[in-house]
Amino acid sequence: MKLLIVNGSPRIESSTEILARQFEDGFTSIFPDTEVVNVRLNDLSIIPCQACGIDPTPLPCVYKDDLHPTLQHLMQADMVLIASPVYFDSVSAQTKLFIDRSNCFRPPRFRNNAVGFDDHGILRGKGAYILVGGAREKFDAAERVIGGFFIWAGIEKIGRVIYGHDDWQLGGVTLNSETLRQSHDLGVSSASSLS
Ligand SMILES: Cc1cc2nc3c(=O)[nH]c(=O)nc-3n(C[C@H](O)[C@H](O)[C@H](O)COP(=O)(O)O)c2cc1C
């Protein structure tokens, strides 16, 4: 099995990161030999999608920057976990850069001067997500962004964990055993969905 974890938080040991680790622990409890690829998007230098309109063959993208290996891992992953903080009601900018660069997982087809897209995304893996926000507890916009990305790319959604809180403590989720358990359980159920 191959598990790709895409972490969109800029903070080390953030609640987002801790919950992603819980998911990983749950997943690997079912498949101990999993190849786990952990990507902290904040460590990468990422070119935003340029809407280049160029034939992306070979997939996934004509731009070979720091994100390119992650997009290649995504093509091979059985399971992808997107873990993001909520910033201004949406996913973090780091997460959005990654999502936009996945546009060619529904490859464009060029005909004369027009471009159309296949009806279905080309990925065949499954996916889950974790969102961490503050006390506003408005997650619908971020959920639509990730949900839309899954549908576009052809990823089957297995589940999600949503954590809203009103403290400013780094990694504060460690005090919330229920949310830690939910993330671990999502890792277990995600792995089970593959067996
Ligand atoms: C730039 C910025 C924008 C934010 N916008 C929101 C928001 O719209 N809604 C919300 O619930 N929390 C918002 N927050 C709070 C974060 O989601 C919250 O601090 C969360 O714990 C971050 O995740 P982390 O602890 O894993 O880093 C924002 C924080 C920052 C830094």
Image (cartoon, helix red, strand yellow):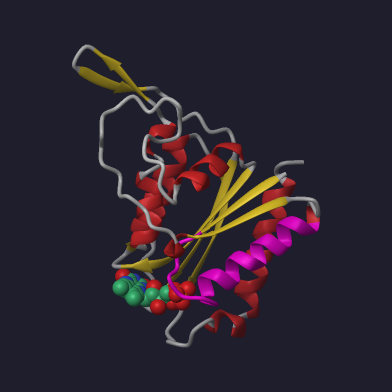
- Give the image location of residue 22, x and y in percent: 66, 67
Residue at (67% x, 70% y) in the render: 181
Q: Which residues are magenta?
A: 7-29
Q: Residue furthest left?
A: 113
| Relative image position of residue 37 (x, y in whole percent) | 62, 54
Ligand 1 sits in quadrant: bottom left
Is 48 on the left-hand or right-hand side of 99? Answer: left
Write the residue at 36% across / 63% down: 92
Residue 176 is situated, as x and y percent measured from the top left of the image, at 60, 81
Percent position of residue 105, x then y: 44, 33
Q: Is residue 76 left or right of residue 61?
A: right
In reply to whether residue 18 is colored magenta, the answer given is yes
- Residue at far top of view: 112
Which residue is painted at 56% across and 79% down in the image? Answer: 173
**Direction from residue 76 to residue 144 in the image, left or right:** left
* Residue 122 relative to residue 65: left or right: right
